[in-house]
Amino acid sequence: MTLSPEAIRALDAVSLTAAVRAGTISAVAVTEAYLDRIAAREDAVRAWQYLSPEQALAAARALDGRGAQGPLAGLPVAVKDVIATHDMPTGYGNASYAGTRTVCDAPCVALTRAGDGIVLGKSVTTEFAMASPGKTRNPFDPARTPGGSSSGSCAAVGAGMALLGFGTQTAGSVIRPASYCGVVGYKPTHGLINPAEVKVLAQSLDTIGLLTRTVADAGLAASVLGRRPDLFPVEPAGRLRVGLFRPAPFDKAGPGTIAALEAAEKALRDAGVEVAALQTPDWFIDCHLAHHRVMGFEVTAALAYERLSPQVALTGVTRDFLAVKAGVTAQEYDAALAFRDEHARRMAALMEGIDVLLAPSAPDVAPVGLDSTGDPVFNTPWTLFRMPALTLPAIRWQGLPVGVQVIGRRGADRATLAAAARVEAALACDWIAA
């Protein structure tokens, strides 16, 4: 059976990899279908930092030659350009590192290739995965930001140019841009996917995340990259108790985000899911300062060379960002870690009797303009507490996607994926930017 490129691209990752293993679709046909989409959309979206159709097709031909049987068979993947690839440049979004070649793949890349996935190329990141934007545009409106720092991966999946994207999150760099670009964004429990050979900013916070079309696709990829086969298949939760959580400062939530939360709450109640509104504790507002201090102290150490060396050219945005972060003292850092540990326990107590939280993914739809990647205010607490979180497309607000965030207990990724799949089914929202 021969499928058209459009029919191939309509398949989710679970269906596509099964078809490649069965020999129904060749890896070359998959790769050509996605390269066609890239040719059609890349000029507008600008998601890719490095792209070599020849490399991708050579990898696909090699898979077809031996018969791909891996769990990620034929899966087209975008790798964020802070993650090492031995055969492609890794430039960290910085001019001084442009063209740099590492001697090895990061573990997540090596496991992707071992699972018969196909790395299409490197996706755009903000400079050193911080605040200085790259060239990428939002796939729904090129006048708007795609978010950051995982700009290219989110935009590539949102525009149908890849079926799996790798991101990293130190504050909100997976969840927020995934909401802006209308895709599923999964930030696992901290450390579930090994971060070696990634340009780490904050060892207590940085998490490799996944951008996909569905929750099941995220579970498939995480089961391979985290070497946790229990994460797939993802079975939607049966009985589900959801805590509706409006995190402080909730006045940052715009009309699109408020509408998305209201639509999600109604869809869940209509689907028979138990939803209870949780009281936001007074201490929650202090999570943002604690996150700032943990990130600030760690990032100024992690980027000591880049910050102090005149040989590295940094944008003004990055220099200003690092200057602010460098003001955090060791005493403030230690206090922030103590706050994190104490209040992680309080958060666990708050979640007694419920399975997951339902909260905003981003303040609103993607903002107009390309000079900023948006505000991570609705992401930093969950990153601080190192809890698993997924953003799911919920609604379109004035033609633009808005997500809602499902947050689970630390270490409970299987249960969180199952809950997210149930929420996803209730929302029944799926699209790719034209």
Image (cartoon, rainbow, N blue to C red):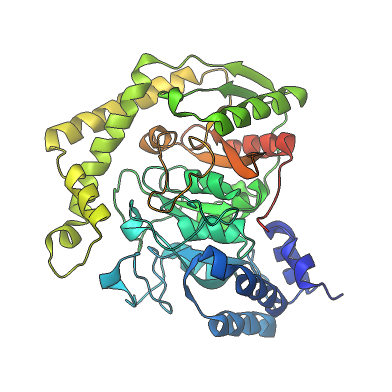
* Residue 180 shows in this picture: yes
Displayed quadrant of residue 315: bottom left
Rendered position, 242 above or below 315: above
x then y, percent, for residue 397: 63, 38
Q: Which residue is located at x 13 percent, y 37 percent?
A: 329
Q: Residue at x 49, y 39 (%)?
A: 388
Residue 129 occupies quadrant: bottom left
The reply to whether residue 114 is in sight is no
Q: Position of residue 243 (x, y in %)?
A: 57, 22
In the rendered structure, the answer to whether residue 199 lies left or right of residue 358 reads: left
Instruction: Look at the picture and state if 260 lies above or below 373.
Output: above
| Front residue of this view, candidates 11 and 395 | 395
Give me the residue at 38% from left, 27% from top: 344
Instruction: Name the quadrant of the N terminus.
Output: bottom right
Where is 321 relative to 139, above or below? above
Residue at 64% across, 71% down: 40
